Image (cartoon, rainbow, N blue to C red):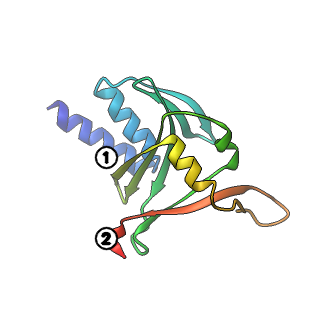
Amino acid sequence: MADLQVGLILEEETAMVNKWSDIFLDSLNSSCVKCETINRVNGWRETAIISNRVCFVKSETYDASHKYYFLGVDPERLKESGDLVVICGGFKDSLKDIFLIPWQEFFQTISLGEAINTYKLPKVYYQYKFKVHDIGSD
């Protein structure tokens, strides 16, 4: 009965908003895995401590027509340090994928690219933009 209730709660939360990382970390908390939010930006969880590991957390919705997740990361994040990058991806009304990537490798890799302005001028906001996709889908 408890499994059914958790499933119903997850479905209701997912239908309301696609904050996949919130759904994932809330499910970890309900499974007695210690999770603490350290930082939110515009309501989105960005940094959390999960089982004593500092994690950069991203929520992304799967683009089925292109078969990838399209992500952006603020260059300021490269100045920080931690243990893992947790990318939580969802599709329609379900949490679909969880990617765990070592922090150092993730940020070293994206820093090889060029941060681009993602806003229309005169506004300016630079991000590293990249795709996460299944290599078997090419």
Q: Quadrant of the C terminus?
A: bottom left
**For residue 138, side relative to residue 104 (left or right):** left
Q: Picture coordinates of residue 113 (x, y %)?
A: 64, 61
Cα gap from disc 1 to disc 2, whole angstroms:
29 Å
**Residue 112: quadrant of the picture:** bottom right
Q: Quadrant of the N terminus?
A: top left
Q: Which residue is drawn at 41% across and 53% down?
A: 89
Q: Mark 2 points at which residue?
A: 136
Q: Picture coordinates of residue 10 (x, y %)?
A: 32, 42
Mark 1 touches mark 2? (CB < 8 Å):
no
Q: Which amino acid does label 2 sit on?
A: Gly
**For residue 45, side relative to residue 101 (left or right):** right
Q: Which residue is drawn at 37% across and 59% down?
A: 91
**For residue 80, side relative to residue 2 (left or right):** right
Query: Pointer 1: residues within 10 angstroms few (<14), some, or many (20+)?
Result: some
In the image as oriented, which residue stretches furthest toward the left? 1
- In the image, residue 99 above or below residue 113: above
Query: Pointer 2: residues within 10 angstroms few (<14), some, or many (20+)?
Result: few
**Label 1's element?**
helix
Q: Which amino acid does label 1 sit on?
A: Glu
Q: Name the residue under label 1.
A: 11
- In the image, residue 10 above or below residue 35: below
Q: Residue at x 64, y 36 (%)?
A: 80
Of mark 1 and mark 2, the one earlier in the sequence is 1
**Residue 52: quadrant of the picture:** top left
Q: Picture coordinates of residue 122 (x, y %)?
A: 85, 63
Observer-nearest residue: 134 or 43? 134
**Label 2's element?**
helix
Q: Picture coordinates of residue 54 (x, y %)?
A: 50, 30
In the image as oriented, which residue stretches furthest toward the right? 122
Q: Residue at x 51, y 41 (%)?
A: 103
